[in-house]
Structures are given as structure tokens and as C-alpha cells.
Amino acid sequence: MDAKQQATKPTVAEQITQKADTLTASERKLAQALLGNYPMAGLETVATFAERCGVSAPTVLRFASKIGFDSYPDMQARLRGELEARLQSPLTRSSLPRSRNHSGHPMGELLHEMAEATTSNIRTSLANINPAELQSAIELIGDCKGSVYLLGGRFTSALAVYAYEHLRTMRSHVRRVSGQSAKWAEDLLDVGKRDVLLVFDVRRYQADVIAFAEAAVRQDAKIILFTDQWLSPIAQFARHVFPVRIETGTTWDSSAASMVMLETLLEGVGQHNPEQVRARIKHLEMLRRPPQS
Amino acid sequence: MDAKQQATKPTVAEQITQKADTLTASERKLAQALLGNYPMAGLETVATFAERCGVSAPTVLRFASKIGFDSYPDMQARLRGELEARLQSPLTRSSLPRSRNHSGHPMGELLHEMAEATTSNIRTSLANINPAELQSAIELIGDCKGSVYLLGGRFTSALAVYAYEHLRTMRSHVRRVSGQSAKWAEDLLDVGKRDVLLVFDVRRYQADVIAFAEAAVRQDAKIILFTDQWLSPIAQFARHVFPVRIETGTTWDSSAASMVMLETLLEGVGQHNPEQVRARIKHLEMLRRPPQS
DNA sequence: TCCCCTCTGTAACGAACGTTACATGATTTC
DNA sequence: GAAATCATGTAACGTTCGTTACAGAGGGGA
């Protein structure tokens, strides 16, 4: 029957043109309508799509089946996937005065592409963040009487480290969940309802990170989540979610937008009770000086 | 049948931001998710959308109703319409309508300022990087037969962590200099002329970091330095220097531009010998799979 | 600490959906 | 020109969807 190879996914359009000559008259009408208004036409209901093309519902079903799908929703899912991918690549837009030293040299192009992709990510991400949401998260951290826990995945743990160093200068009771995930249970022991967990989790969402977050919530901790636009499963039990764009069109995802979003949150926390932070920094510097000089 | 008037219809995104401050906590999660993955998230079923955000179906319905729609399919129709319009004008419009949710609200201004400051930093920084310099640094890491050492200061150690995790997937012999600086001497023991030190040091240049770098150079290691525009003292004995802008006009400096520059370097290293990297990643995944499944 | 109010999830309903079996109509073949 | 075959629509099925009523949970104010 069907060889489900996820490796090299042909687009729906390709599947249609491939089977084009085996299609009947009515099915060709459907094919033309779908390719003509691709892929939106295929995202409507069977009935709507059928009526628009002047055929019956079963014809649509047979069409979907013939071009290689198990069901109509199956085809829709694929179309949605393609659309999503297409929407997220408004990359390679030239607005920079393209500095001369970049012309010609392949590395110059890489620099340019990375700058464009990441700045685009940052702009889009922060423009879509709800200020009230940010405000709430800031207050949650700033007014938290318990501890603030930091946790990240493989690559995002760097962000947790970064957040840890900053938060430590602003308030006490900041803890980083680090090391082998098997040992995280020990950290979990102390987590309670007065605590906040700031967790970073982007795609290839890590099972151990999700498990920790879930356990923390069960112990009534509040979760602030930094994730990507597709939302980590942690979003389901997080109090505040900050989705940012991570794609750059290169091999790896970028944490730049997450970093900026984090820095914005940290700045907000600092501004929330400035005198406390200032006093703390002053105290810290006093403690540091004597032994050094 | 339907009168398609594109003229005065507010977008769904605008309707959300307009009612943003009347939304409840759960509804905000929905809003964040929808705006973060706009508009695909809203084209899913109520149940799917609800589950993804960790709320119940009725909450989704109330959300749709609150932002001004008669029904959920009603909202979907509008989203589809916007999407269709956007797809048919491929290059004319840039990504999203500038959300007005940032005006007025103090956090909105903060978000805007941070986005502007960091994107400006990134553009300026990367535009001033010499592609040839980048190329050389990439080759230095990519062709390095010895070890690559990673080191950062108080806040920049997060970047070292980030670089470590990435480089480890691309090559062997990657070491991070971490822990108490008093113990760094032990790492220094092994540093030799076949080794490369990738060091991060921005203002308030840390004495211990500088000392390590200096010692490494004395043992004939090559140094690649990420620093700010005023240059860490390490620049004096570094082979390659990448200065980036870090100012944002806020209390703390930003590492976003450094992060992007680092990601650019990492991407370059990956592209430098792609087959080796691919083989290594494949091997890594094979080693990881068995115990999990 | 208690109470009130808002927010939220559970459960049930009807409607619409995708799907299937079957009959009708069109087309081809001998 | 009759029979067989294919394409297509009709009608009914079970499922899933969007929707609503209601009860419980949670947070804020006195």
C-alpha cells in the first residue's frame, strides 16, 4: 500500500501532479482548484471544497485518497505543515545598506543572512509579546517570596545560566537546576507554592525538562516558560508563556530572540524594585572589594 | 455571496491586541500562542488549540467571543481570509501589522526599545565584521587538530556554555574552562600550541579571564576573542577579535549581538566540513536512541 | 480568615463533519 | 445496440466538532 517515508516528504502539490494523468474529470477540477488557490482551498471542509468545485463530497474524498492520503484530515495536516513552513521564511530581505566589505565574499553573505534572520526574529517575536503578560511575569519574579528556579535544555541551559547570573544580582534565593537530570529530583524536593520556575524549552523539547516542570507544577510552583512559536508541552501548565522565533534558515536554531526576550524580562525585574536591586549590588561590591584590593 | 471588503476590516491580531487588557490569564495564553504562531494556531480545531495551550475548550470559545467573533469558525474564516490575502501578495507586505499593543503600556515601550536597540546592535556589529577574519576563525576551529577551549566571564560564560554544546556536536576535543577561577590552572596545564581558546570578555573585563588568556598565549595557544567595541585587553594577544555592540540604554548590557556573532561562527564551522559534522551527529543520535526507546 | 466574585474545567447536547454503501447515470466495448 | 465498466451523486452512518449549562476552584477584599 503506502510507503510512509517521512524522510523525503513530497508536497501535496507534487503528489497531485504526479498522479495527474490518473485523475478523472471531476477530480481534475478539484486539482485545479487546489493548485489555483494553494493551499487554502484544501483547508476548507469537504463539503465546502466540494460545493465550490461543483462536485460531491465523496468525490473529494476519493480525490484525497487517490493522491495518496489515508483521509481528508490527513491531507489537511500536510497542507497546514507546508503553509507553516512557507510563512516562516520571509528571510533574505535586503534592507541593510549592505556594507561593501560583505560583497562577494561568501562569509559576508553568511554574516548578512544571520543578521537579517535574527533581527527579523527579534522584531517579530517582541512585537507579538503582550506587555501585560510581561508585566505579570516581572511581578511574579520581582515579588516572589520563595525561590526562583532556573532550568534549560541542552542548548537553552546557556540562557538559564545567563538568567541565573543576572537574577542573583537582583534578589536572593535564586537557584539553578543543573547537572545530570537524574539528580534533579533533589532540587524538586524544595519546590513549593511560593516558588517560581523559569524554564527554557525549545523544539526537540526535552523529556526530562518537561517532566521537571510538570512535577514542579504539581507542587504548586508557578512556571514562566520561554519557548519557540510551536510551544513546548510545558505551555500547558505554565502560568506565563513567551514564544519567540528561532529559525534562521541555517543548520541550527538561534537563541538570539530568546536572549533578547530574557534580557527584556530581566530589565523589567530590575526596574520593578530598583532601590532593592541597587542596594544589593552596592552590598555585593562592598563584599567583593576588600579581599581583592 | 460574500462581500469581501478588505478595506476597513481589522485583522484578528489587531482585535486581540485591542482587547488585550480585558483578557484573563488563560485567555492571554491563547493570545500569546496565536500571535506567536500567527495565524496557523487559530486554524486548528478548538480541542487541539485548547490542549496545546493547556486550557479547556470552553476557554477557547470564550476567548473567540471576547475578541469579537460570533463563533470559533467565524474567527477561523477571518484568519483564513487574512492568510489568503497575504499569500496572494508574495513580496508586497512585510510580515505582520505593527501591533499597537505596545503603545501606551510601559512594558510595551520596554519591549519596543529592547527590540530596536538589540537589532541595531546586531546589524551594526555584523556589518563591521571582516568576512575574511570570520573565515580565518572558522578554519582555525574547523581544522584545529588539538583541543578547543571555551572560556567566559561572569555573564559571558553563558555564551561559552552555548558554544560548548554546539561545538561538541561538531567535533571532538572541546573543553570548557569552568568553575572557580583558582582551579583554572589545572586546565592550563594541558594547553599547547595546537590548541585554540575561544574566549568571551566584555566590559568590566575580568582579571582572571584575562590572566588565563595571557597564560594560554604564552603556551602558544591561539586565541579567538569575542568582546565589545571597546576591546578587552585580551585583544592585544588574540589572533582573531570579534567586537560587537552591547549597549541598549538600559541598566545592563546585552549579549544578543555576541550571541548572533557566535551563532554565525558556529554555522560557519559547521559548513566548513559538513560531512564530518553530519556523520558525527548521526553517530551521536545512534548512541542516544537505544536506551530511550 | 471568611466570603464573594471571577475564572475555569466537566459533562452533555445538537450540529456538522468525514466517511461509506449503494444506486444512478455516463461512457466505453464488443 | 446491448452489456459491462467506470465515474459520480444520494443517502445514511458513526464520529468529532463547536457549543452551552453548571458546578467547582481559585484569588482578592474586608
Image (cartoon, coloured by chain):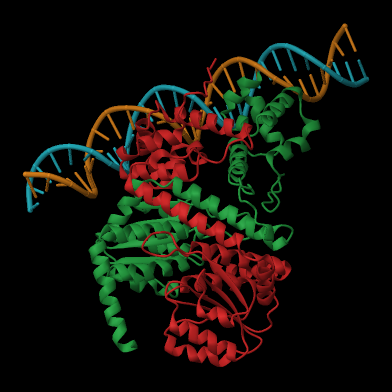
Chain colours: A green, B red, C cyan, D orange
Res. B141 in view: yes
State whether residue B60 is above or below residue B8: below
Coordinates of residue D3 in the picture (x, y in percent): 83, 16
Q: Quadrant of residue A68?
A: top right
State whether residue A271 is above or below residue B184: above
Left or right position of D15 against B146:
left
Q: Quadrant of residue D23?
A: top left
- Asked whether B65 or A99 is in front, the reply is A99
Coordinates of residue B115 in the picture (x, y in percent): 46, 52
- Asked whether A203 or B211 is in front, the reply is B211
Residue drawn at (49%, 91%), measured in percent from left and top? Answer: B185
Quarter of the image where the N terminus of chain A is located: top right
Quarter of the image where the C terminus of chain A is located: bottom left
Coordinates of residue B164 in the picture (x, y in percent): 55, 74
State whether residue A159 is above or below residue B48: below
Left or right position of A81 against B159:
right
Left or right position of B42 against D4:
left
Q: Quadrant of residue A274?
A: bottom left
State whether residue A138 is above or below residue B63: below
- Asked whether B185 or B105 is in front, the reply is B105
Residue drawn at (50%, 73%), measured in percent from left and top? Answer: B161
Coordinates of residue B255 in the picture (x, y in percent): 47, 65
Res. A222 in view: no
Residue drawn at (56%, 34%), measured in percent from left and top? Answer: B83
Left or right position of A139 against B109:
left
